[in-house]
Image (spheres, helix red, strand yellow):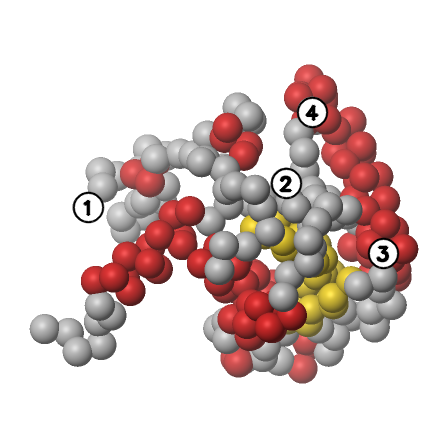
Amino acid sequence: MNPYRYSEDEIAAVYRAIRERRDMRHFRSDPLDLALLERLLHAAHLAPSVGFMQPWRFIRITDRCLRAQVHALVEAERERTAAALGERQDDFMRLKVEGILDCGEVLVAALMDGRERHIFGRRTMPDMDLASVACAIQNLWLAARAEGVGMGWVSLFDPEQLGRLLRLPPGARPVAVLCLGHVESFYEKPMLEQKGWEKRRLLNEMLFENSWSDHGIARP
């Protein structure tokens, strides 16, 4: 018997949050309780980080004018992305890709400045700072789902423009615009799958053994 194993109900809850997490784009506008928001941010802050560098910084956007400016940057990049998609342009423009003006809270997750000081774990893989921020975002996402709160990760923006807008110091970089808020319901499947944009691939297509394979291996 493993004395460190959680109870069956606790284990099931962890797997349920992972399974039912969704990238939400449809929100109600009512605000989040501040104590709830603090719990979610604490969950993010408990994320692992390479060399314990803790490179994440979160900017809470409370100014409605500033929120509109962030939305304008996203909308401009949405149009540029659509133009780059060629024959899928019209399909893309029909998708709802963010809920910045609708959700209860907007956060911007950013990489801190001065990351070059942190060599532990990054000497040959400097992008591990980005991986660490992604871990914090995932913690936030899973905690939000467990709390019944929707979250959407928006990556359609020019990082230099957003950095200037938010007055980030030299060397810092925005990674994600995060929409948080109450929802009428969670999508049964990822929205892009529901809309036919893409479908989830099978695990055995992505699991290899000992070396890279173009075909994957059978599931264990």
Residue 166 at x, y = what percent?
84, 64
Residue drawn at x 46%, y 49% is 21
Residue 11 lies, with reference to residue 199, above or below; the image says below
| Amino acid identity at mark 2 | His
Question: Which residue in the structure is indicated by mark 1?
Answer: 220
Question: Which residue in the structure is indicated by mark 3?
Answer: 64
Q: Earlier in the sequence, mark 4 or mark 3?
A: 3
Distance between the alpha carbons at the discs numbered 4 and 3: 26 Å
Q: Secondary structure at mark 3?
A: helix
Question: Which residue in the structure is indicated by mark 4?
Answer: 94
Q: Residue furthest left?
A: 1
The quarter of the picture where residue 156 lies is: top right
Residue drawn at x 32%, y 44% is 207
Q: Secondary structure at mark 4?
A: loop
Q: Circles 4 and 1: CB distance less than 8 Å?
A: no
Neighbor class of circle 2 (other Cα within 10 Å; few <14, some 14-19, many 20+) is many
Q: Nearer the viewer, residue 92 or 32?
A: 32
Q: Circles 4 and 3: CB distance less than 8 Å?
A: no
Q: Nearer the viewer, residue 111 or 23?
A: 23
Distance between the alpha carbons at the discs numbered 2 and 1: 37 Å
Question: Which residue in the structure is indicated by mark 2?
Answer: 26
